[in-house]
Image: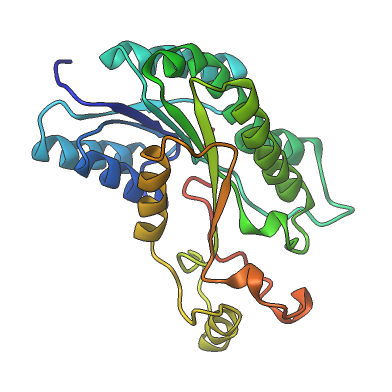
Amino acid sequence: MTNSGPVALITGAAKRIGAAMACQLHSEGYRVIIHYGHSKDEALALAEKLNSQREDSATCLQANLCNSDEVSALGQRALGIWGQINVLVNNASSFYPTPVGEISEDDWVSLIGSNVKGPLFLSQALAPALAVSKGCIINMVDMHIDRPLPKHSVYLIAKSGLASLTQSLAIDLAPNVRVNGIAPGAILWPEREMDEDEKDKLISSIPLGELGTPNDIAKTLSFLASAPYITGQIIYVDGGYLSDSTPTELKSQEHPVPPDDPDPK
């Protein structure tokens, strides 16, 4: 493909927050590589939309992020499209409850694989290219690593691992690659139906008194991608949720931001 401008690979970018981040970077002149797990139709539609705005500026790649061979291949395929990677966004994530007593090996493989293993091996595969471009990695963490969500122990282990990985890679890949994270709060209503009482309860737990939007996350991504002296940081975009001293048990038990690709394999 022929084009110019920096290149971003965004995992789980077919819809919701991932798509908003792809659109934001594309609007700033990036060429974007849209990774997807099962959301092929949405990914292709997004690429078509972006290419209609600027020719040969978006493409799609599929990979199972729980399979290290596929992850390494994803990195090589992504690098081969335009010959460079400037920004890697590890966004795709599995998310579902794992009550104690019901946790299985499959749960561990899926949640740890998509949230930690995939980002680790993809970052490793692309680290040399990112060093050449003086690029950055941005990981999508979760505000609940500091205020645990009940019945989600494996997911929270995974996201806590991703937060630790963010700070470790910031040291290991410096000075040529910056690594930061974003911890979203209440950005989108869950895809399941919620009654008005549930919605009111969630909104009342947010000091700013409203949901955020995918654009809030996309703007934070844009800031981090263009901030040359910031690394090893995790920015909470949660409307002040974590600054509120309300006890956890009085807050909503519903995770307010279901990941964009709940089964990114």
Q: Is residue 156 above or below residue 208?
A: above
Q: Is 35 in front, or is 216?
A: 216
Rendered location of residue 27, percent (x, y): 20, 44
Q: Is 150 in front, or is 42?
A: 150
> Within the image, what quadrant is residue 152 found in?
bottom right
- Quarter holding the C terminus is top right
Q: Is residue 117 visible?
A: yes
- Quarter holding the N terminus is top left
Q: Is 129 in front, or is 38?
A: 129
Name which residue lies at 55% across and 80% down.
207
Rendered location of residue 129, percent (x, y): 43, 13
Q: Is residue 115 above or below residue 193?
A: above
Residue located farthest toward the front when viewing the structure as drawn = 229
> Within the image, what quadrant is residue 228 found in?
top left
In-image side of 36 versus 178 (left or right): left
Name which residue lies at 14% across and 16% down.
2
Q: Is residue 259 above or below residue 185?
A: above
Q: Is residue 66 visible?
A: no
> Within the image, what quadrant is residue 252 found in?
bottom right
